[in-house]
Image (cartoon, helix red, strand yellow):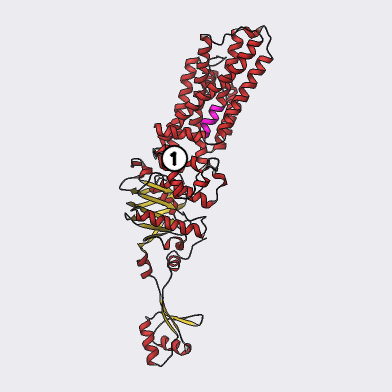
């Protein structure tokens, strides 16, 4: 399994999209932090809650985590590299497991990179404006850990989606449509059917609950993580079944 | 070494492979021939565990592919030259697979050298010619130094010098004791390289034999040229021969001895008397109903 994970990590690092991910994370996180600090009231900047919001910017990495998760599966079908991959490891479930592990490692990396950008922008800026820093407090360490775990969950869901939907375009576009349209429509539908409680169990609502910041009509933090992992397990099992059965022709 | 037994695979309404059985003997180069769409790729992909047959199956080295321990060290395969990420360099493509198969990095450089691709190894595959991709595919197959090679149309996209290079490479690989199964829809590409042929058409086995046996079974004739062709033709026809005109010559389905004796007895001058062998390509066309496509 170690060899397969190393192979998967090497695949990720040896195309140009790897650099696109890193640059996008640095730019997006840097701009968000800068905009948050720049537009804030100076009195606010010394508060713990404001600085926690800054740490939450790390959560932006989840978007890249899920895209990476989907892509590391679907790119194999798009370019036909699935053939040599399955020749090297004919037990396809092991390949999917290796991809999931690689996606977790990279998602942690993405979150740490985003964190580094937050720290690199926020600490000098807040120091210059003489704000009181809380970024070393235990509360922050917990929040960072939660954000990293959150990115991991998104990456795992991405791999599971990719294993179910092998077409790269369909998987990426379908996921976006699901997040921004279908779940919203389902919330309305569940309301009409008087089953509002079910809304919290929709996949991206469970993920929403798993970011540690709470929210209305969402599961508790622990239940959110458990339910998110449930979706990962469900889609992962379906994807493994489908991938094993598929004729690679 | 490779054994296919009653292999059947249907895609929707199309019966791609129909109860196909054949064996590839150890240490031989076997040509796997048939027109495009005959079911060659489906068969090879079934052998390699990529396609799930509806019935029957295949074994390599006595086991199903997925049951092989460290399969890339036992079996190497090139299926399609395009199965490479276009944005990855040739070297990195090989490194990725070497990592998965537990092959040392140094072996990547060895196979790059072997297929004469070292100079282009840093370039992204997007910029490779079809011939270079074929070479990269061969390098992939050779990564684990396998005893069995399965190659699907490896000569596609190679120029004549490339085809010769491939032929020499396959010969030297076979000389090392490897078993090679190589498919083609153009018999001439492999006729000089292979020891045996398996010919399929519409998913069914047509013939499994050595090259010599295929030729021996071919319909031939005797070619004869004479200034008195019309008289000779009439004499042969009177003896029951089937005679056809081929340019200035006649081709008759009598052995040359009999034609020579007939001519001598009747005082006919002959300018040429030769056995006409059907070429492998003609045999191939005949066996597969002339439905080759280029």
Identify the secondary structure beneath mark 1. Answer: helix
* Residue carrying label 1: B97
Where B282 falls versus A82 (above or below)? below
Mark 1: few/some/many CA within 10 Å (<14, 14-19, 20+): many
Check residue A154 for magenta coloring.
no
Where B240 falls versus A235 (above or below)? below
In this rendering, position of residue B208 left or right of residue A65: left
Place of residue A15 in the rendered image (x, y in percent of width and height, measured from the top left): 54, 36
Q: Nearer the viewer, residue B246 or B77?
A: B77
Quarter of the image for residue B204 reads bottom left
Where A212 falls versus B231 (above or below)? above
Q: Residue at x 42, y 55 (%)?
A: B169
Q: Please tell me how many numbered marks the rendered image carries.
A: 1
Range covered by the magenta-colored residues: A64-71
Give the position of the N terminus of chain A as an image quadrant: top left
Check residue A66 for magenta coloring.
yes
Place of residue B24 in the rendered image (x, y in percent of width and height, measured from the top left): 34, 55
Where B279 falls versus A147 (above or below)? below
Place of residue B256 in the rendered image (x, y in percent of width and height, measured from the top left): 38, 82
Q: Residue at x 57, y 30 (%)?
A: A21
Place of residue A211 in the rendered image (x, y in percent of width and height, measured from the top left): 53, 18
Asked if one can make out residue A211 in the rendered structure from this viewpoint, the answer is yes
Q: Nearer the viewer, residue A218 or A103?
A: A103
Asked if one can make out residue A163 in the rendered structure from this viewpoint, the answer is no
In this rendering, position of residue A19 left or right of residue B283: right
- Secondary structure predominantly adopted by residues drawn in magenta: helix
| Letter of the chain that mark 1 sits on in the rendering | B
Q: Nearer the viewer, residue B113 or A112?
A: B113
């Amino acid at each position: 399994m170690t060899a397969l994970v190393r192979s998967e990590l090497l695949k990720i690092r040896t195309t140009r999209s790897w650099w696109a991910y890193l640059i996008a994370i640095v730019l997006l996180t840097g701009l968000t932090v800068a905009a948050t600090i720049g537009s804030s009231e100076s009195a606010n900047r010394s508060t713990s809650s404001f600085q926690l919001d800054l740490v939450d910017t790390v959560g932006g990495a989840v978007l890249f985590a899920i895209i990476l998760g989907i892509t590391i599966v679907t790119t194999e079908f798009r370019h036909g590299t699935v053939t040599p991959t399955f020749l090297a490891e004919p037990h396809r479930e092991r390949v999917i497991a290796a991809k999931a592990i690689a996606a977790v490692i990279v998602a942690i990396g993405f979150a740490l990179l985003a964190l580094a950008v937050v720290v690199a922008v926020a600490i000098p800026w807040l120091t210059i404006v003489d704000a009181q820093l809380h970024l070393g407090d235990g509360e922050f360490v917990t929040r960072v850990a939660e954000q990293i775990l959150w990115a991991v969950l998104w990456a795992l869901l991405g791999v599971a989606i990719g294993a179910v939907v092998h077409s790269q375009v369909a998987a990426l576009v379908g996921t976006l449509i699901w997040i921004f349209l279908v779940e919203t429509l389902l919330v309305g539908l569940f309301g009409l059917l008087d089953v509002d409680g079910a809304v919290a169990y929709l996949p991206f609502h469970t993920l929403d609950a798993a970011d540690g910041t709470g929210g209305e009509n969402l599961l508790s933090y622990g239940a959110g993580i458990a339910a998110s992992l449930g979706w990962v397990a469900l889609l992962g099992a379906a994807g493994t079944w489908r991938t094993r059965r598929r004729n690679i022709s | 070494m490779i054994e296919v037994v009653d292999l059947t695979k249907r895609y929707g309404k199309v019966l791609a492979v129909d109860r196909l059985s054949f064996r590839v003997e150890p240490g031989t180069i076997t040509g796997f021939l048939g027109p495009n769409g005959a079911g060659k790729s489906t068969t090879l992909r079934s052998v390699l565990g990529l396609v799930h047959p509806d019935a029957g199956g295949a074994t390599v080295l006595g086991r199903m592919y997925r049951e092989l321990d460290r399969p890339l060290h036992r079996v190497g395969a090139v299926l399609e030259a395009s199965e490479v990420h276009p944005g990855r360099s040739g070297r990195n493509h090989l490194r990725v697979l070497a990592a998965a198969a537990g092959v040392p990095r140094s072996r990547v450089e060895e196979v790059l050298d072997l297929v004469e691709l070292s100079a282009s190894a840093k370039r992204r595959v997007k910029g490779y010619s079809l011939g270079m991709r074929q070479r990269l595919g061969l390098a992939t197959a050779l990564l684990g130094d396998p005893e069995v090679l399965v190659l699907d149309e490896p000569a596609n996209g190679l120029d004549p010098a490339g085809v010769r290079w491939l032929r020499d490479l396959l010969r030297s690989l076979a000389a090392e004791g490897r078993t090679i199964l190589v498919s083609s829809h153009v018999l001439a590409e492999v006729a000089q390289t292979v020891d045996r042929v398996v010919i399929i058409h519409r998913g069914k086995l047509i013939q499994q034999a050595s090259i010599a046996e295929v030729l021996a079974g071919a319909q031939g004739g005797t070619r004869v040229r004479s200034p008195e062709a019309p008289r000779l033709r009439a004499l042969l026809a009177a003896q029951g021969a089937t005679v056809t005109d081929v340019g200035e010559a006649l081709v008759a389905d009598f052995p040359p001895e009999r034609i020579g004796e007939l001519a001598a007895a009747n005082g006919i001058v002959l300018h040429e008397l030769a056995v006409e062998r059907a070429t492998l390509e003609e045999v191939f066309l005949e066996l597969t109903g002339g439905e080759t496509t280029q």
